[in-house]
Image (tube, rainbow, N blue to C red):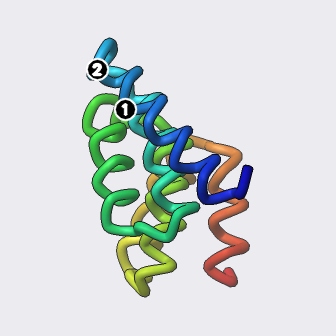
């Protein structure tokens, strides 16, 4: 199975799971990651935003949306995410700092 077909299948499964548990930030974050891997950055950003809306301290989703923002040349937004991750003492702060070249 090609990688794109695998991501399409994963997307279907996560959408099915969201039908059962629409308030799961983890499921929204996984769906965002799938969109990012497929190159659909706008949909990825929306999914990560939904996850963060449900759990504002969800550092995985915060990191992942910052990665998407970097890919979309939204450096100021990604930098704000870094500051927030640092306040949370998240291990993702260091990874994002490296991506930002700080």
Q: Name the residue under label 1.
A: 15
35 left or right of 76? right
For the residues bearing labels 2 and 1, Cβ distance under 8 angstroms: yes
Q: Is residue 49 depicted above or below 29 in this figure?
A: below
Q: Residue at x 48, y 45 (%)?
A: 61
Q: Which residue is drawn at 49% across and 70% down?
A: 39
Q: Which residue is drawn at 45% across and 53% down?
A: 84
- Percent x, y for residue 12? 44, 36
- Percent x, y for residue 70? 49, 77
Q: 8 or 72, which is in the foreground?
A: 8
Q: 26 or 79, which is in the foreground?
A: 26
53 left or right of 27? left
Q: Mark 2 points at which residue?
A: 19
Image quadrant for the C terminus? bottom right
Q: Is residue 77 depicted above or below 24 in this figure?
A: below
96 left or right of 8? right
């Amino acid at each position: 199975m090609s990688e794109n077909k695998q991501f399409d299948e994963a997307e279907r499964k996560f959408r099915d799971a969201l039908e059962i548990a629409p308030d799961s930030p983890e499921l929204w974050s996984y769906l965002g990651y799938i969109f990012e891997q497929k190159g659909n950055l706008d949909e990825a950003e929306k999914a990560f935003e939904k996850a963060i809306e449900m759990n504002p301290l969800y550092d995985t989703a915060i990191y992942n949306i910052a990665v998407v923002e970097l890919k979309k040349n939204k450096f100021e937004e990604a930098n704000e995410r870094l500051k927030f991750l640092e306040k949370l003492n998240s291990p993702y702060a260091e990874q994002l700092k490296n991506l930002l070249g700080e």
